[in-house]
Image (tube, rainbow, N blue to C red):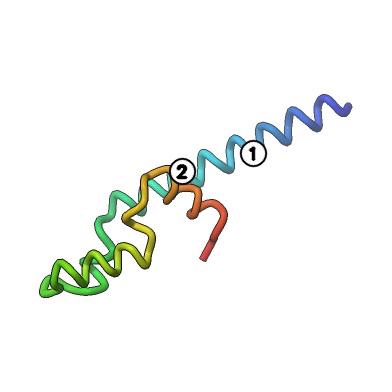
């Protein structure tokens, strides 16, 4: 019985991480949120600053980790 519960918990974690990854990829596919927030007339400095504030200048895996552990 314990093995069954453990196996189901592991499967549940795998499914949740997979669904979170798909959701994260869909957010990435939509486009750059910085351009949406600042508009087309933003200076490169403003874009760099906002990307740093939002964490979009970090590697993909770090962004995904933040997506998992810091829900909105």
Identify the residue at horizontal 66%, vertical 38% (top origin).
12
* Label 2 Cα crowd, 10 Å radius (few <14 / some 14-19 / many 20+): some
The image quadrant that residue 40 belongs to is bottom left
Residue 24's place in the image compared with 37, above or below, is above
Q: Residue 14 at what x, y percent from top left?
A: 60, 35
Q: Nearer the viewer, residue 29 or 44?
A: 44
Tag 1 secondary structure: helix
Q: Earlier in the sequence, mark 1 or mark 2?
A: 1
Name the mark on residue 4: none
Identify the residue at horizontal 51%, vertical 66% (top origin).
72
The image quadrant that residue 13 belongs to is top right
Residue 33's place in the image compared with 17, above or below, is below
Circle 2 sits on which residue?
21
Question: Left of 25 or right of it: where is 46?
Answer: left
Tell me the quadrant of the picture where the N terminus can be found. top right
Tag 2 secondary structure: helix
Name the mark on residue 13: 1
Identify the residue at horizontal 36%, vertical 46% (top origin).
59
Q: Residue 25 at what x, y percent from top left?
A: 37, 46
Identify the residue at horizontal 54%, vertical 60% (top origin).
70
Residue 28's place in the image compared with 40, above or below, is above
Question: Left of 50 or right of it: where is 67?
Answer: right
Residues at marks 1 and 2, CA–CA distance in whole angstroms: 12 Å
Question: Left of 2 or right of it: where is 47?
Answer: left
Q: Residue 17 at what x, y percent from top left?
A: 55, 41
* Label 1 Cα crowd, 10 Å radius (few <14 / some 14-19 / many 20+): few
């Amino acid at each position: 019985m314990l093995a069954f519960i453990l196996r189901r918990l592991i499967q549940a974690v795998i499914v949740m991480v997979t669904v979170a990854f798909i959701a994260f990829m869909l957010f990435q596919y939509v486009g750059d949120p910085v351009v949406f927030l600042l508009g087309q007339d933003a200076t490169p400095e403003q874009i760099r600053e906002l990307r740093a504030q939002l964490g979009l200048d970090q590697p993909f895996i770090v962004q995904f980790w933040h997506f998992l552990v810091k829900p909105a």
